[in-house]
């Protein structure tokens, strides 16, 4: 909570106009997942009454802050690349809301009329699923984060009919078939023994497409699909502006970042840590401690407008956008997380912070080199991607 207050207290943009309350905490946007399904990994800043904090202007990290923190070539790269966002249910106002966000921060328009933005159902059509106020906030966050890091990218939103792994997996397949070079998945659920079978694992294995998955917001513990060896698992950090450093920011492991040793997925050849005999989570990390400024006009618990949101949901679309900025997924061999392990020096190592307690210390405590909560570190430009 202290980190949340520190972020919001900073005048993150000259146009920020905080509303009538102040952030006193944050909580999950979505509820617990149903059996066989997933929950979204977004967390929303709340006010004194535990209601979602809203403001008349953006409060939180802006695109300019994120681009500076992660040294992104956002103004020059990304043209011709499509980043897909997969989520459950429908966000009816999402294109208009995306326009508000991009206009606020001077980003070029991205509309369906221009061919920059496209929204489809999991079959590729326009029979969208029912609207859901929780997942609508997740979708707004995801699209805003892709826009923040890769404003020149095209954006494809694929809405799954439900939050079941079957429907979400079908939506990932659809995104790959429609030309995405990177696909973001900001959701997860408990691991299960069948997660390595073709029925589930195949959805996240598409040559030429980098697929990211958020690691979860509950601290130490592993979720699927982040546990898949086919995805880049994205953990979370606390990012704090710091003018005393050359980078201008300091970064530590976020207490909510999911991490650990998978119970079922075999050890990928590209992971060399010795304390986990199977797939270790995460691979890389980005800001998760709420928050980032997000715009959503679809009411969530009676609130709408400028919100401050976080969770590892921030990192999945941000890292997907980094792959698109690099623009060479077609030349790399999947799974794309493996390439990160060949370029650890091209990431900002995150060496402090913890997400809980565990028997193998590096799986829950950040340190020099690889660790569970932040993986190999946070983006430092696109060289690692």
Image: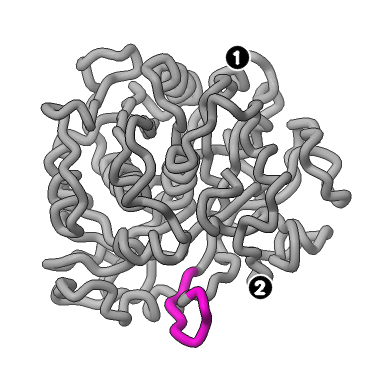
What crowding class fits label 1: few (fewer than 14 Cα within 10 Å), some (14-19), or many (20 or more)? few
> Which residue position holds label 2?
352
Above or below — where is 329 with respect to 255? above
Residue appearing at x 51%, y 26% in the figure = 209
In the image, is residue 90 part of the stretch drawn in magenta?
no
Q: Between 83 and 134, which is closer to the camera in this rendering? A: 83
Residues in magenta?
A: 239-247
Say which mark, if any, is on residue 329: none
Quadrant where the C terminus lies? top right
Residue appearing at x 50%, y 74% in the figure = 247
| Majority secondary structure in the magenta region | loop
Percent position (x, y) of residue 346? 63, 56
Q: Quadrant of residue 12?
A: bottom left
Taking 185 as reference, is 272 left or right? Answer: right
Query: Label 1 to label 2, Cα distance in Å?
Result: 38 Å
Which of pointers 1 and 2 lies earlier in the amino acid sequence? 1
Any part of residue 236 in sight: yes
Q: Between 134 and 73, which is closer to the camera in this rendering? A: 73
Residue appearing at x 29%, y 41% in the figure = 152
Percent position (x, y) of residue 184? 44, 36
Any part of residue 32 in sight: no
> Which residue position holds label 1?
199
Q: What kind of element bears circle 2?
A: loop
In the image, is residue 242 part of the stretch drawn in magenta?
yes
Taking 99 as reference, is 364 left or right? Answer: right
Percent position (x, y) of residue 274? 88, 49
Percent position (x, y) of residue 226? 60, 39
Q: What kind of element bears circle 1?
A: helix
């Amino acid at each position: 909570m202290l980190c949340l207050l520190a972020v919001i207290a900073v005048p993150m943009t000259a146009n920020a106009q905080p509303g009538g309350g102040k952030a006193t905490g944050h909580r999950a946007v979505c509820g617990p997942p149903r059996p066989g399904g997933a929950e979204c990994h977004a967390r929303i800043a709340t006010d004194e009454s535990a209601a979602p904090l809203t403001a008349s202007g953006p409060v939180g990290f802006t695109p300019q802050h994120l681009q500076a923190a992660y040294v992104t070539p956002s103004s020059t790269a990304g043209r011709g690349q499509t980043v897909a966002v997969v989520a459950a249910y429908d966000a009816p106002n999402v294109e208009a809301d995306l326009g508000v966000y991009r206009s606020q921060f001077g980003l070029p328009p991205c509309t369906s009329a221009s061919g920059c933005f496209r929204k489809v159902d999991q079959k590729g059509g326009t029979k969208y699923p029912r609207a859901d106020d929780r997942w609508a906030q997740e979708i707004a966050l995801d699209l805003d984060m892709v826009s923040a890091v890769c404003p020149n990218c095209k954006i494809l939103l694929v809405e799954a009919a439900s939050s079941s792994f079957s429907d979400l997996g079908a939506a990932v397949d659809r995104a790959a078939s429609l030309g995405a070079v990177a696909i973001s998945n900001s959701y997860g659920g408990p691991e299960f023994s069948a997660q390595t079978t073709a029925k589930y694992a195949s959805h996240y294995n598409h040559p030429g497409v980098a697929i990211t998955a958020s690691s979860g917001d509950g601290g130490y513990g592993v979720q699927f699909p982040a546990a898949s060896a086919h995805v880049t698992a994205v953990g979370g950090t606390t990012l704090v502006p710091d003018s005393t450093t050359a980078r201008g920011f300091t970064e530590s492991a976020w207490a909510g970042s999911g991490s650990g040793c998978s119970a079922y997925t075999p050890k990928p050849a590209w992971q060399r840590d010795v304390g986990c005999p199977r797939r270790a989570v995460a691979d890389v990390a980005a800001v998760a401690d709420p928050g980032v400024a997000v715009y959503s006009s679809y009411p969530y618990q009676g609130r709408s407008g400028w919100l401050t949101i976080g969770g590892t949901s921030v990192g999945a679309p941000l890292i997907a956008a980094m792959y698109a900025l690099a623009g060479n997924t077609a030349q790399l061999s999947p799974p794309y997380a493996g390439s990160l392990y060949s370029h650890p020096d091209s990431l900002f190592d995150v060496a402090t912070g913890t997400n809980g307690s565990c028997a193998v210390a590096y799986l829950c405590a950040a340190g020099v080199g690889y660790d569970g909560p932040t993986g190999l570190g946070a983006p430092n430009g696109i060289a690692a991607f």
